[in-house]
Image: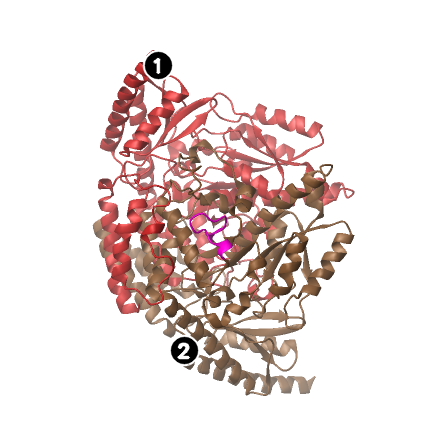
Chain colours: A red, B brown
Amino acid sequence: MDAAEFRKRGKEMVDYVADYLEKIEKRQVFPDVEPGYLRPLIADCAPQDPESFEDVFKDIEKIIMPGVTHWHSPYFFAYFPAACSFPALLADMLCGGIGCVGFSWAASPACTELETVMLDWLGKMVNLPEEFLAGKDGQGGGVIQGSASEATLIALLAARTKTIKQVQSEKPELTEAEIMGRLVAYASDQAHSSVERAALIGAVKIKSVPSDETFSVCGSALKKVLDEDKAAGLIPFFFCATLGTTPCCSFDKLLELGPICNKENIWMHIDAAYAGSAFICPEFRHLLNGVEFADSFNFNPHKWLLVNFDCSAMWVKKRSDLIGAFKLEPLYLQHHHQESGLVTDYRHWQIPLGRRFRSLKLWFVLRMYGVKGLQEHIRKHIRLSHQFEHLVLQDERFEICAEVVLGLVCFRLKGSNELNEALLKSINDAKKIHLVPCHLREKFVLRFAICSRTVESTHIKFAWQHISQLATDLLKTWGQNHHQQ
Amino acid sequence: MDAAEFRKRGKEMVDYVADYLEKIEKRQVFPDVEPGYLRPLIADCAPQDPESFEDVFKDIEKIIMPGVTHWHSPYFFAYFPAACSFPALLADMLCGGIGCVGFSWAASPACTELETVMLDWLGKMVNLPEEFLAGKDGQGGGVIQGSASEATLIALLAARTKTIKQVQSEKPELTEAEIMGRLVAYASDQAHSSVERAALIGAVKIKSVPSDETFSVCGSALKKVLDEDKAAGLIPFFFCATLGTTPCCSFDKLLELGPICNKENIWMHIDAAYAGSAFICPEFRHLLNGVEFADSFNFNPHKWLLVNFDCSAMWVKKRSDLIGAFKLEPLYLQHHHQESGLVTDYRHWQIPLGRRFRSLKLWFVLRMYGVKGLQEHIRKHIRLSHQFEHLVLQDERFEICAEVVLGLVCFRLKGSNELNEALLKSINDAKKIHLVPCHLREKFVLRFAICSRTVESTHIKFAWQHISQLATDLLKTWGQNHHQQ
């Protein structure tokens, strides 16, 4: 395919994507296919000779779309939102075209420098303390990671290196393996599984801190486990606070936890993967109070800020802590500017070496929506979640299971877990909308997350009527079955 | 921006990208900017109100392009190639439009299933042993990682978990920390820095195995360090063999190393990040002989197989080894198909949780080029590297520093390292072409890598004439300076 054909096919693809997103509502949100559906539809091996674009293109509807879960359908209420916007799509086209690999400043200065400035823009939008910004000569700064999981892992590894060095300087008789054996990381019992995974990868112990009745970790809970562990000779070194937990969007109490971490010399990382985008609205910024105590902070514009995946924003107060954990300098990656102090080599900030020009997406989205446009998007989603909450509350058969703060509603039928499992199954089997569940303590709970950029009040009403009707049908049969038993 | 405007702007962006790539030769390959150039050109913070697409668009040439290193210029000979092709760009547009996050089968079945089948296609193209393929019910299979660094890390972590379990079952008196303290990973002294980094992250020792005079690790070298370490009570558990090292594209001797690793119960991972793409040509496939002894194998189609970054292909013989290292199952990620055996949940195969629909790029590229088209691309690059090699060999002032096997030529002026550093500086300061150096033993060496998809014989001739002229100029002054001293 030459440039001339790309011009033609690229424009067809633009129209296809525009059509797909404009008419996505008409597609069934969750696919009908069974595991293994795709292999029989496709050749056994790659063709020897080139096929035409037309041949490939027609297979999109034939082979791919029947197996797609439509994350941008206004009937998709599962997981958390995955961002998708036209400005971000345009930026990604440009990113692909430039096709640079930005592991060092010299590998493409614009790629590095735009990222630093965009993370400053974004940091200012959520009113991060100055220390987290790169500015012209700050010690902190931001970086785009691929996912919140990576940000958590990077923070944990930086904390591990820092603590090992500290302990070794105080107790030179301890070997690194001995110190490692005593390190403990902490996170809420509501924290995302990626925190446990980070500890697994980093080969350190991790303990759950019990959350309170609002599913939040408070200071006293953390203090209790820290005291016990220190008494047992362990070395607490890392606490991952969550703002907006995955099960129910609860918030750990930073203002209580931060001072404890600071006093105990524990790295506090804040994972606000989903909730962080809401902090661009002044009325929700208070949820981030206490960030001033943190060492690192992360949220995902690719979830809720209309920047297509992947764009996970991470800031640290001291970039030297990150770089200290990873820096290795083979000659083929050195360049003559790198000692100037003005230069950032982002490869030292992340797990992979290579990186795409992802800051273009932030640049396009922040400029073409403006702060106000993005605030509007966040506020609409939160309005819609409260609309759904009110509908649930008006139906006495149901209960709300956690405070609705942002765009997630946790609800269930009053009754057994089995009943709610059956309700979820009937919802997802009908495939008119799509939800996923969670556990809150012993309860099986349905999560209703406002996801799509184009979801409106009418979709919420439809979803509720549908759920309500399925509940009615279910309760009818359920009662009979129960009676027969 | 609504869909109607996206249709318009998307088509403008397609033309911009096509223009950029068609005329890239006219742009200076390496930018003139100094560190910190971008910040003064850009506002201090994000705009409150939306800006127009035109405003953003005109800043691409004004702010971004002056700071871009043009990786796809036919005058770019630095690092290794970064793939870029029109079919891959089209697939990425589709990937962005669908915008699904494929962490589990249910999150988008097509995203998972196409990946499994595409990795089978690709595995067959390089003639991987059947055990590495997923097939319909194999124990192995492939996955797309973001980078070779991640593949190495994942392999090392899987090996770590496997070894710890084994050792614990044999010697239950040892704690995990004690075992960890004895584990040792190995790689060539020519291996990429990401291997050392993986060991750093995984908190295990790593040792360099001395390469021979061809910069390859042979069996006896590995055996020697293994014997020493076992005698010292250490536990060798992981060897990363490199096919196509970054400094000079040398190849570790798999046929000697593999049987040793198998006998010693050491996980052998093969990092063929750059070289792997060449194995689709039967005449280069012998370089992969011995892969049958490996536990995992990785190469980067995003380097040399015309699939835009990121697409790093990794295969394992036993998927259960990977999954065993990472599997955590929160309820919100469970789905009712997952126990069926037919289903792959790729989140257990990688560091991040989220993932884009990257297999679309493989599907588009493999079909629209066909195996023959891709072979042609590889063969052209290798022909051009030999052309450059011959030009160097005809000039008695220069020497070739390592065998030219694929698309990389390592060369230098006969003389001191300072002289060669000065030559490289004059080349890169002139900015007509762009190269990076490496060290081979004590020698400072220039790397000439064939990179661009559109590079032709004329560019090679131009590059050589340019280098040769700069060498002449340099030697003139150098002689005088040397004489004066």
Packing grade of label 2 (10 A; few <14, some 14-19, many >=20) is: some
Residue B456: numbered disc: 2
Across and down, in percent, residue B401 comes to 61, 77
Q: In the figure, residue A73 lies in which quadrant?
A: top left
Chain letter of the residue beneath label 2 in the structure image: B
Please name the residue that numbered disc 1 is placed on: A482
Q: Residue furthest top?
A: A483
> Circle 1 — which element?
helix
User: Residue B133: within the magenta?
Assistant: yes
Q: Quadrant of the C terminus of chain B?
A: bottom right
Left or right of B432 on screen, residue A411: left
User: Tag 2: residue type?
Assistant: Glu
> What residue appears at the point 50 percent right and 54 percent down from the top-left corner?
B132
Across and down, in percent, residue B89 comes to 34, 60
> Circle 2 — which element?
loop
Left or right of A134 on screen, residue A91: left
User: Tag 1: residue type?
Assistant: His
Residue A368 seen in the current view:
no
Q: Which residues are magenta?
A: B130-144
Figure check: B283 above or below A225: below
Residue B428 seen in the current view:
yes
Q: In the figure, residue B246 lies in which quadrant?
A: bottom right
Q: How many marks?
A: 2
Chain letter of the residue beneath label 1 in the structure image: A
Q: Which one is in front in this view, the residue at disc 2 or the one at disc 1?
A: 1
Figure check: A106 above or below B185: below
Residue A149: numbered disc: none
Left or right of A331 on screen, residue B4: left
